Image (spheres, rainbow, N blue to C red):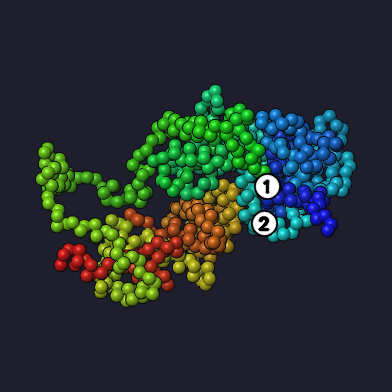
Amino acid sequence: MPDIIQLLPDNIANQIAAGEVIQRPASAVKELLENAVDAGATEIKLIVNDAGKSLIQVIDNGKGMSETDARMAFERHATSKIKSIDDLFCIKTMGFRGEALASIAAVAQVELKTKRAEDEAGIYLEVENSIVKKQEPVAMQTGSSIAMKNLFFNVPARRNFLKSNAAELRHIIEEFTRVAMSFPEIFFSLSSNGQEVFHLDKGSLKQRVVQLLGNSYNARLVTVGEKTDYLNIHGFVGKPDTAKKTRGDQYFFVNNRFIKSAYLNHAVMNAFDALIAKDNFPLYVLFIELDPAQVDINVHPTKQEIKFEDEKIVYAFVQSAIKHALAQFSISPTLDFELDAHIQSLDAVNQPFTEEKKATASASSLYKTFTEKNQAHFIENSSDLKSWKDFFEPSPSTKAMPSAKLHAVDEECTAHYYENAVQLHHSFIVVQNNEGYLLVHQQNAHERILYEKYANATTGKAIPTQQSLFPATVQLAAADAVLITELLPDLQLLGYRLEPFGPNTFIIQGVPADVISGNEALAIEKILEQFKHFSNELKFSKREKLLRSLSIQHAIKAGVSLTSKEIASLLSDLFACNTPGTTASGRPTFLSFKKEELTKIFGR
C-alpha cells in the first residue's frame, strides 16, 4: 500500500492558516491598522470600497521597509518583534505573530508600496496567491501603502459567507474604532466608496471618544484614573443615564490593545450595581496598564482574548476604580434608578401629598396601629382572608387565552363594555364581558396592535407620512448611520422619510402621524437601539426586527393616562387583531377572569 500522508502545498497551507486570522474584511483592517501603528505612523488613512470586498487600503507615514524586508513581510511567521522566547512574554507592540501579511496575501491580490526615509526610491510589490508577481522601484513619500483587492477571490466559498455590504462595513467601523480609540495622538481617517466617514484629528482621549461615539457623550462622561505599583487604569465611564440595552459602547484596552473580557465586564457591572436597570449596560472606555509579563496575549489568533497572571487583583481594582470615580462625581443610587421611568408619572409619585390627604391617611386604623406605641398586637384579625394568596396565583382560567378562543372573547366584549372599561394605575384596563372580566395590559395590547399595523404596511399599503414643517436632523455614530441607511427602504414603508445630510447625519422630512412632534430624532435613536437589542436573535429577519422595534418604541407605555374614548379604541383595535392574545414576543396582552371564581374568592 502506498503512503497516504503528504505535506500540503504552501498555497493551500497558507489559505488554511489565513482562515484563523482573516475571517472577513474587518479582520484585515485590524491587522493592517495595527501594522501601521507599529511602524511609528502619526497619520493613518483607511480606504475601503464595497465594504472591503473589492478594496482595503491603508496608507501611513511610518518608517517604511527596505526591499528585503518588504519581500520577507509576506512570508509566514516573519516578524521583527520576536527574536527569542523571552520576547514573547514582554510584547509591547500590536502585531507580533508574523502572520498578517502572509494570511492576507493568501486570500487576496495585494499591492504594497513602501519607502524608508534613508532610501531614494521605494519598492512596489504585487503579490497574488502568496506569490510575488511583480517587483519594481517606485517614487513615493516615506511610509507604506498596502492595498488588498478582491478578498477571497481564490476561495469563492468563503466569499459567499460574507454578509451584506452594510453589515460588513459596520464590522470595519468597529475595528477602526477600537484601534483609533487606542491612539488619540495619531491622526486617523476612514473613507468608504469615496465618502469620508471619519476624520479624526490628533487630540486628547476624551476628544477621540466623543469623535467616535458621538457628541451627545461630551458632558456625560465620568473620568476614571487610579495608579498603583501593580497596575494603572484610566479612561471614562458613562453616567447612568447613558446606559443602553445593548453592549455596543464598551471598550477595554490592556497595554493599548483592545480585549474582550466577560470577567472584567462583570467587574464594571458590579460597580454600577443599583445605578442602572438590570437589563441595561453602561458605557465605558477603560485602559489598563501593567507589566506585559503579567499578561498572556498569545491565547487566540485575533489577540483579543488574553489571560492575566492574577485576575482577581485586576477585577477588584477595576471595580474599585469605577466606584471611586462615580462617588467623586456625586453619582450614587437614587430612587429614580430603581423605578421604571413610567412609574414617575403615576399620581402617587408626581402629585403633592396635600394636608387633606395627610389627614385622611392619619385617621385610618392601620396607620394608628403602626404609629402608636404598643399597638402592634391590636392589628385587626384577618383570618377571614386566609385564602388571599389564591387571588394572585394564576389559575388555568387566568392565563392568556389560546388564540382559538379569542374571537369568542371579542364577541362577548361589545362596544357597550368597551365604553365602560376602567383604567387602573394608568397601566391596566378592566373590561367586563358576559362571563366575568378581562384585565388588559395597555402597553402589551398596543404593541400587538402596532405590530400588525406595521406588518400589514410592509406587505400592502404603506403608512401615511406626516410631513415635518420644520425638519429635524439626527446625528448618529458612524456604525448607526450605516445601519439606518440599510433600513431606509423599510422605514419609508412605515411612514418615515429620512434623507442623508452630510457625514452620519440625516434630515427627518416626515414621520408617522403617531410620533409626537419634537421627538422625531429621539424616536429614531430609540428605534435603532431597540433594533440592535434584537440583533442577537438570528432567527429574525431584518424586517422582523424593525417591526418589533417600532411596535415596542411607539406603544403607549405603562403609566400613561387614557381617556374613555382612547380606552374603547384600544380595546376595539386589539380584538380586531389576528392574534390579540399576545405581543409579537409572546407576552400576554390580557388575562381572563371568570365570574364564578370571583364569587368563590369571597366565599359566596
Q: Position of residue 473 (x, y in %)?
A: 53, 51
Q: Position of residue 358 (x, y in %)?
A: 17, 44
> As shown in the figure, which amino acid type bears the numbered disc 2?
Leu
Image quadrant in which the N terminus is located = bottom right
Q: Nearer the viewer, residue 356 or 592?
A: 592
Position of 412 relative to 67 (above/below) = below
Element on which disc 2 rests: loop
Q: Which mark is residue 162?
A: 2
- Mark 1 / mark 2, whichever is N-terminal: 1
Position of 529 relative to 80 (above/below) = below
Relative horizontal placement of residue 233, taking residue 447 as reference (left or right): right
Q: Nearer the viewer, residue 67 or 50?
A: 67
Q: Nearer the viewer, residue 213 or 437?
A: 437
Distance between the alpha carbons at the discs numbered 1 and 2:
12 Å
Residue depicted at x 87% and y 33%: 120
Q: Which mark is residue 27?
A: 1
Image quadrant in which the C terminus is located = bottom left
Residue depicted at x 51% and y 29%: 225
Q: Position of residue 105 (x, y in %)?
A: 78, 47
Asked which quadrant contains residue 392, the reply is bottom left
Q: Position of residue 206 (x, y in %)?
A: 55, 34
Residue depicted at x 44% and y 57%: 553
Element on which disc 1 rests: helix
Q: Nearer the viewer, residue 228 or 566?
A: 228
